[in-house]
Image: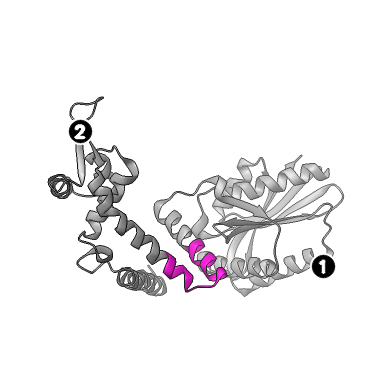
């Protein structure tokens, strides 16, 4: 790993650890009683799972919270002994017991739940409406990234908003410099492509799409008019953090759909041999390689390629 990459990794690790320290202190995880109750955070989470899922087995709780079975058993024994939780045999599996919260348990847990809601509400109230939206969007993004729960339905394709065209140029320059070592010449070319598109834009037969994920820009693509019968797919981009979700395929399919709707007879595009992910997307969409040429561009030796799709 290059020294710069090692330094970047160390800085990211430090940033995550710093946030962890801040947030655990902010919500009081390190205090003896969670939210001024007689329960630890783990005990409160177990009660929460029982309250939300009842009747539920200990196996499900252990899997959901990733708790050691012995540790969970000791917590549940305390709850059973104090009358907070009731255990009954499962009618479908005699080897399993079903856990439910008793009336005493509901009374004991209700203040904890109310304080938890109040704590979050107090945090949000310190922020403006836009600040609250930014925070919630960021938390959803973090949740989805760490849990790997994004689905194609989470992706929104929309027209560009003010500032998006500049973002497309900037992200092309930054990503291609980092991943392929391409020089500033490439970013300048992207800027020229975007400028030309904006200057002569024809809403009847040209489009730009921005892919949005959790409120953040995640990709882009252009369909520009080459001639009355030929369209050109340009500047297909997917953010590294959003790859693997089918965004590139969605953008390409939208370009093809719109080109057919406009009556184009062919779509052409220009790419490079080392852009393997993009080439795979084009091949899946039905494009075929029609020509290639080895050359020196953007400070690198590259193989330039032209691909076409007959509509």
Could you tell me which residue is drawn at 25 percent across and 59 percent down? Answer: 41
Q: Is residue 132 on the magenta stretch? A: yes
State the residue position of label 2.
Answer: 88
Q: Would residue 34 appear left or right of 127 to someone viewing this image?
A: left
Q: Residues within 10 Å of mark 1 (few under 14, many from 20)?
A: few
Mark closest to the chain's N terminus, 2 or 1: 2
Q: Residue at x 31, y 46 (%)?
A: 51
Residue 109 highlighted magenta (yes or no): no
Q: Which mark is residue 199?
A: 1
Q: Is residue 170 visible?
A: yes
* Image side of residue 231 versus residue 116, left or right: right
> Of helix, strand and loop, which one carries label 2?
strand
Badge 2: residue crowd in 10 Å (few <14, some 14–19, many ≥20): few
The C terminus, quarter of image = top right
Marks 2 and 1, how far apart at CA: 72 Å
Image quadrant assignment for residue 195: bottom right
Q: What span is colored magenta in the figure?
A: 121-138
On screen, residue 88 versus residue 153, left or right, reads left
Task: Residue lying at the far right in this picture: please name it.
Answer: 228
Q: Can you say which quadrant of the picture contains the N terminus?
A: bottom left
């Amino acid at each position: 790993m290059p020294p710069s990459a090692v330094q970047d990794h160390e800085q990211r690790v430090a940033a995550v650890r710093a946030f962890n320290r801040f947030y655990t202190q902010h919500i009081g995880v390190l205090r003896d009683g969670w939210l001024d109750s007689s329960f630890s955070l783990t005990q409160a989470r177990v009660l929460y799972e029982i309250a939300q899922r009842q009747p539920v087995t200990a196996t499900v709780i252990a899997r959901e919270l990733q708790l050691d079975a012995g540790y969970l058993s000791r917590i549940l024994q305390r709850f059973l002994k104090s009358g907070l939780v009731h255990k009954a045999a499962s009618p479908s599996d005699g080897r399993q017991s079903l856990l439910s919260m008793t009336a005493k348990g509901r009374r004991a847990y209700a203040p904890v739940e109310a304080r938890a809601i109040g704590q979050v509400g107090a945090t949000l109230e310190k922020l403006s409406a836009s600040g609250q939206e930014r925070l919630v969007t960021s938390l959803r993004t973090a949740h989805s990234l760490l849990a790997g729960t994004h689905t194609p339905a989470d992706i929104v394709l929309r027209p560009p908003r003010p500032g998006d065209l500049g973002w497309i140029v900037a992200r092309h320059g930054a990503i291609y410099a980092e991943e392929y070592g391409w020089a500033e010449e490439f970013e300048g070319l992207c800027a020229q492509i975007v400028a030309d598109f904006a200057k002569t834009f024809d809403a009847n037969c040209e489009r730009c799409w921005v892919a949005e994920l959790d409120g953040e820009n995640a990709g882009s693509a252009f369909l520009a008019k080459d001639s009355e019968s030929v369209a050109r797919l340009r500047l297909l981009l997917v953010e590294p953090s959003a790859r693997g979700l089918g965004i590139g395929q969605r953008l390409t399919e939208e370009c093809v759909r719109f080109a057919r709707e406009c009556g184009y007879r062919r779509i052409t595009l220009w790419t490079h041999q080392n852009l393997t992910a993009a080439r795979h997307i084009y091949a899946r969409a039905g494009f075929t390689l029609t020509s290639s040429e080895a050359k020196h561009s953007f400070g690198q030796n590259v193989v330039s390629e032209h691909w076409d799709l007959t509509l």
